[in-house]
Image (cartoon, rainbow, N blue to C red):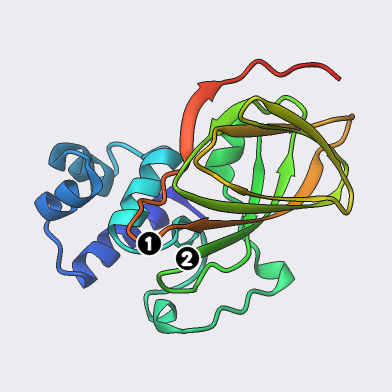
Amino acid sequence: MDRLQIIEKIKELRATKELSLSQLAAVSGLSKGYLSKIENGIKFPPITTLHRIASALEVDLTFFFSQGTLDGLKSKIAIVRKNERQLIGDEQRTSGIIRYPLADHKFGPNMHPFIIELPSDHSEIYQFEGEEFHYILSGKVEFFYGEDRYVLEEGDFAYFDADVPYTGRSLGSKSAKILMTAYYYKGVSSLPYSRRVLKIKKE
């Protein structure tokens, strides 16, 4: 998805919801001036900021990266074909994770399913008010949950409360592939990303 198209989606969705820049700023916690620079193409927001904008506009982050339209958001069912998956490219550049959303067009989702390719040098720590489910499709994962360490292999899964800091990385030369679903508690901003680094222990 081209960056200009993402900006146009933000502007179109804000206009559809009849929100002024000041109102969006108040809901998102971002400044009116910064939002104006985004909409005018002067600044392009990082993934964490896009999360805040998406939450304020009551859509999933993946809507900005998909080919979905505003009309599609009205549907109560989302069908995504294999060849229609959209890579969230900006996240790959910042954290190394390759993430494919599996339900781009569902309006107001509580669950957020993805296929994730997790690199061996990943070190981002995540924490938010909600739950996550990880099923290891292939590879081997070193997973840290709070002070605890686990090694998960193909066919293993983890289901956990995400209010405890967690992170993980692939063990081996190839990135592990994970089916991940996140659930955000009602009324909680869908901003799970905390840019802190955890020292990964070697196996």
**Amino acid bearing label 2:** Asn
Q: Label 2 near label 1: C-beta < 8 Å?
A: yes
Q: Helix, strand, or loop for circle 1?
A: loop
- The 10 Å Cα crowd at callout 2, few under 14, some 14 to 19, many 20 or more, is some
x 64%, y 32%: residue: 167
How far across and how far down the image is residue 50, in percent? 39, 46
Residue 175 image label: none
Which is nearer the eye, 53 or 151?
151
**Residue under circle 2?**
110
CA distance separating discs 1 and 2: 8 Å
Image-based side of 80 in relation to 34, left or right: right
Q: Is residue 94 visible?
A: no
x 54%, y 44%: residue: 162
Residue 186 image label: 1
How far across and how far down the image is residue 99, in percent? 64, 49
Image-based side of 170 in relation to 155, left or right: left
Relative to 128, residue 79 above or below: below
Which is nearer the eye, 203 or 191?
203
* Sequence-earlier tag: 1 or 2: 2
x 43%, y 48%: residue: 3
Of the residues tagged 1 and 2, which is closer to the observer?
1
- The 10 Å Cα crowd at callout 1, few under 14, some 14 to 19, many 20 or more, is few
**Amino acid bearing label 1:** Lys
Q: Is residue 96 visible?
A: yes
How far across and how far down the image is residue 85, in percent? 65, 63
